[in-house]
Image (spheres, grey):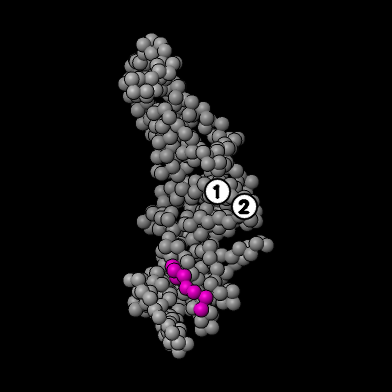
């Protein structure tokens, strides 16, 4: 390799022996592609099954991920070869369609390619090999249908599903407490499953995590957890039979859209402006009280004066709640999201049997639990763990267990 310059002074590289390089063709190209697929399968082979080991991956910005999940490993790998990218796509499609078995499909594909290489060496045409695999696939599926066993389950008999989940969790880092986690996953799926329509909406199962505690402290909440607390420390921490107003409009006096300037030259004018603002906010609080709301959940914030007034008027409030969480709360409580105060009516209030604030550890992190909702089909799996990596890996393991259970429960 040599560096040269053209007549304009721009550098270019001369690669020696370039004319001797040839393009791969025929069986050599096929073997090169097969070896690329086998290389990816070889990486994942050591993380397959209950004796499989976890992989430690470091991203370009220094973040470390420790995982056993095939799809996650391949997603974070920097793959250049086109055939290796197809293996990554295979794992991704398995994750989207089934949710589990992402490592197994790649290892299986690698083993199939390995056998195909031997057949190619014996002079068999690739199309015949592909057709042979198609026939073998049909025979294998028929045999699986023949040896498969159906099992009965119900709300009172969940043991078959729990055993299935425990099999999934056996190969994960959480296998030391796979029984309680499997029970949590099964109960969560059965809570949201429509057994008559044989349908499971996994969007209704929210998986949340908070660093601290131990894995055994993981719990299933029949409702929603929100990573917020009451806006004022003196507001009640526990509200029973709550009627919840879910607001996306600002809980404060309106601000003009245009640029404006207010000149106040006397104390009386300032007092008048302040009283007008307070009256406006007082009317908003009264409107909430009139429709029967006992808790206000607001997407936007409000200032300290408004917060103080809410506390004095005995109307607990939560501020800065995200849009996705608001939608989940609305689904769970049977309430309607109210975009304008004028539209607030008693029919649009959500209902929950219990709303409580819970604090964790010595750091006094607080979370809001909304339980025993009118539509109890939205549930939350709340994971605890020693560090962030443990919680992330537990979330991936729970995701696999939920997908396994949801595929078993409607069709068994």
Q: Which label belongs to residue 311?
A: none
Q: Position of residue 306 (x, y in %)?
A: 49, 78
Determine if the magenta segment contains residue 302: yes
Per the image, the residue denoted by label 2 is 385
Q: Is residue 185 above or below residue 60?
A: below
Of label 1 and label 2, which has the lower sequence position? 2
Distance from disc 1 to disc 2, alpha carbons, whole Å, reads 9 Å
Asked whether residue 302 is in view, the answer is: yes
Residue 275 located left or right of residue 23: right
Residue 344 located left or right of residue 114: left
Give the image quarter of residue 233. Answer: bottom right
Label total for image: 2
Secondary structure character of the magenta stretch overall: loop
Residue at 52% x, 75% y is 304
Asked whether residue 68 is in view, the answer is: no
Give the image quarter of residue 216. Answer: bottom right
Residue at 52% x, 30% y is 43
Q: Bounds of the magenta span?
A: 298-305
Q: Is residue 249 above or below residue 207?
A: below
Rendered-image quadrant of the N terminus:
top left
Q: Position of residue 42 (x, y in %)?
A: 51, 27
190 or 126: nearer the eye?
126
**Mark 1: few/some/many CA within 10 Å (<14, 14-19, 20+):** some
Q: Position of residue 340 (x, y in %)?
A: 35, 74
Q: Is residue 115 above or below residue 288?
A: above
Per the image, the residue denoted by label 1 is 392
Residue at 60% x, 53% y is 180
Kind of element beneath mark 2: strand
Q: Position of residue 342 (x, y in %)?
A: 34, 79
Determine if the magenta segment contains residue 184: no
Residue at 38% x, 76% y is 261
197 or 336: nearer the eye?
336
């Amino acid at each position: 390799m040599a560096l040269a310059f053209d007549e304009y002074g721009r550098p270019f590289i001369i690669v020696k022996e370039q004319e001797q390089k040839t393009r791969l063709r025929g069986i050599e190209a096929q073997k090169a592609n097969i070896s690329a697929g086998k290389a990816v399968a070889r990486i994942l082979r050591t993380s397959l099954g209950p004796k499989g080991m976890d992989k430690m991956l470091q991203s370009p910005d220094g973040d470390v991920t420790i995982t056993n999940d095939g799809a996650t490993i391949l997603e974070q790998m920097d793959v250049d070869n086109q055939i290796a990218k197809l293996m990554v796509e295979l794992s991704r499609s398995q994750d989207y369609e089934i949710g589990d078995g992402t490592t197994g499909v790649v290892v299986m594909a690698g083993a199939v390619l390995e056998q195909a290489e031997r057949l190619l060496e014996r002079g068999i045409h690739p199309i015949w090999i592909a057709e042979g695999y198609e026939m073998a696939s049909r025979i294998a599926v028929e045999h699986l249908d023949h040896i498969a066993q159906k099992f009965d389950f119900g709300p009172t008999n969940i043991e078959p599903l729990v055993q299935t989940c425990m099999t999934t969790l056996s190969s994960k880092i959480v296998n030391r407490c796979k029984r309680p986690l499997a029970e949590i996953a099964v109960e969560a799926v059965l809570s949201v499953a429509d057994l008559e329509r044989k349908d499971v909406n996994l969007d209704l199962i929210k998986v949340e995590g908070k660093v601290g505690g131990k894995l055994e402290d993981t719990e299933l909440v029949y409702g929603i957890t929100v990573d917020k607390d009451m806006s004022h420390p003196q507001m009640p921490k526990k509200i029973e039979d709550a009627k919840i107003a879910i607001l996306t409009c600002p809980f404060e006096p309106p601000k003009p859209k245009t640029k404006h300037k207010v000149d106040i030259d006397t104390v009386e004018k300032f007092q008048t402006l302040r009283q007008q603002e307070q009256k406006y906010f007082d009317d908003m609080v009264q409107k909430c009280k009139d429709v029967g709301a006992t808790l206000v959940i607001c997407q936007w914030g409000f200032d300290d004066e408004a917060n103080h007034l809410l506390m004095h008027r005995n109307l607990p409030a939560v501020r800065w709640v995200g849009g996705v969480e608001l939608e989940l709360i609305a689904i769970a409580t049977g309430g309607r999201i109210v975009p304008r105060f004028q539209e607030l009516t008693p029919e649009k209030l959500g209902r929950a049997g219990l709303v409580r604030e819970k604090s964790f550890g010595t750091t006094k992190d607080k979370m809001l639990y909304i339980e025993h909702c009118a539509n109890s089909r939205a549930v939350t799996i709340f994971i605890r763990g020693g560090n962030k990596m443990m919680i992330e890996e537990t979330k991936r393991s729970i995701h696999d267990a939920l997908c396994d259970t949801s595929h078993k429960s409607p069709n068994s």
